[in-house]
């Protein structure tokens, strides 16, 4: 089954404790992206990657890091999480020549 | 940053009714637009693309009005299962997606 997976789905952590949210897709898509979704706001892009070893900042990259060492994986790293990073995070992927993004199920992160 | 604006709703509509909502965009150079559907606490999924000539898929019709810079989504014969949040998306000239905050639709029996 073609899908985007994210782990963990739910995470409660404390300020300053480094965490990683994994994202993996099995569709051989070149493009991958991370978004955060907050009440009353549209999806805001954090980082995106056009292909392996190519990453770019989105609209709200501060406090986040990503890497793209393999085509299928695009982890999101929070080196020192803060309460304002409490949000619902989505990973998405898209194939070359397509405009349809496929989303993972989301990761609900709470930073206390 | 250019914005995409939507009425957040919620729109409470009786089953079987026709409902329409709009989304305005500010970047006149944008060429591609989409409607995504998001169920509560779940991931967005592409509903339909919006072409200059309009696009119809079953009970759903999407239209683009370039002069007034808005896109619309019309749902005919609404079903209970149409209850969701509908996200309007603009693709800018750099192929980046700009997302609206969504319009919440509730279909009542």
Image (spheres, helix red, strand yellow):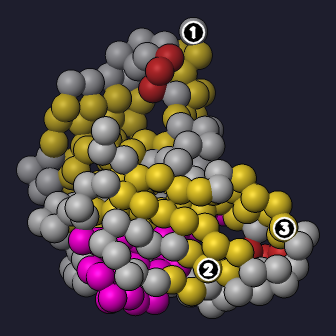
> Magenta part of the protein: which range?
A30-57
Q: Chain of mark 3?
A: A
Quadrant hosting residue A60: bottom right
Residue at x 40%, y 89% (from the top left corner): A56
- Tell me where residue A77 appears, x and y as whole percent: 61, 79
- Name the front one of labels 1 and 2: 2
Instruction: Residue under label 2, please give it.
Output: A77
Q: Are marks 3 and 1 in contact (CB under 8 Å)?
A: no
Q: Is residue B106 magenta?
A: no
Q: Which mark is residue A13?
A: 3
Q: Quadrant of residue A8?
A: bottom right
Q: How many marks?
A: 3
User: B41 or A112, which is in the foreground?
Assistant: A112
Count residues near mark 3 (Cα–Cα under 10 Å), then give few for <14, some for 14-19, many for 20+: some
Residue corresponding to mark 1: B109
The CA distance from mark 2 to mark 3 is 13 Å
Secondary structure beneath dot 1 equals loop
């Amino acid at each position: 089954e073609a899908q985007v997976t994210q782990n963990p789905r739910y995470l409660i952590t404390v300020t300053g404790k480094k965490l990683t949210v994994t994202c993996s897709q099995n569709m051989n898509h070149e493009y991958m992206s991370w978004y955060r979704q907050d009440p009353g706001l549209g999806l805001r892009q954090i980082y995106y990657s056009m292909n392996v070893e190519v990453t770019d900042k989105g609209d709200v990259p501060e406090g986040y890091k990503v890497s793209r060492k393999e085509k299928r994986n695009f982890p999101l790293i929070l080196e020192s999480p803060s309460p304002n990073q409490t949000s619902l995070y989505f990973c998405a992927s898209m194939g070359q020549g397509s405009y349809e993004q496929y989303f993972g199920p989301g990761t609900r992160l709470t930073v206390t | 940053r250019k914005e995409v604006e939507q009425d957040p709703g919620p729109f409470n509509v009786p089953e079987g009714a026709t409902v329409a909502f709009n989304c305005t965009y500010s970047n006149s150079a944008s060429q591609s637009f989409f409607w995504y559907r998001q169920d509560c606490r779940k991931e967005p999924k592409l509903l339909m693309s919006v072409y200059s000539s309009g696009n119809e898929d079953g009970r759903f019709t999407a239209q683009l009005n370039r002069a007034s810079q808005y896109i619309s989504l019309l749902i005919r014969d609404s079903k209970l299962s149409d209850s969701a949040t509908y996200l309007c998306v603009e693709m800018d000239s750099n192929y980046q997606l700009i997302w609206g905050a969504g319009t919440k639709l509730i279909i009542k029996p």
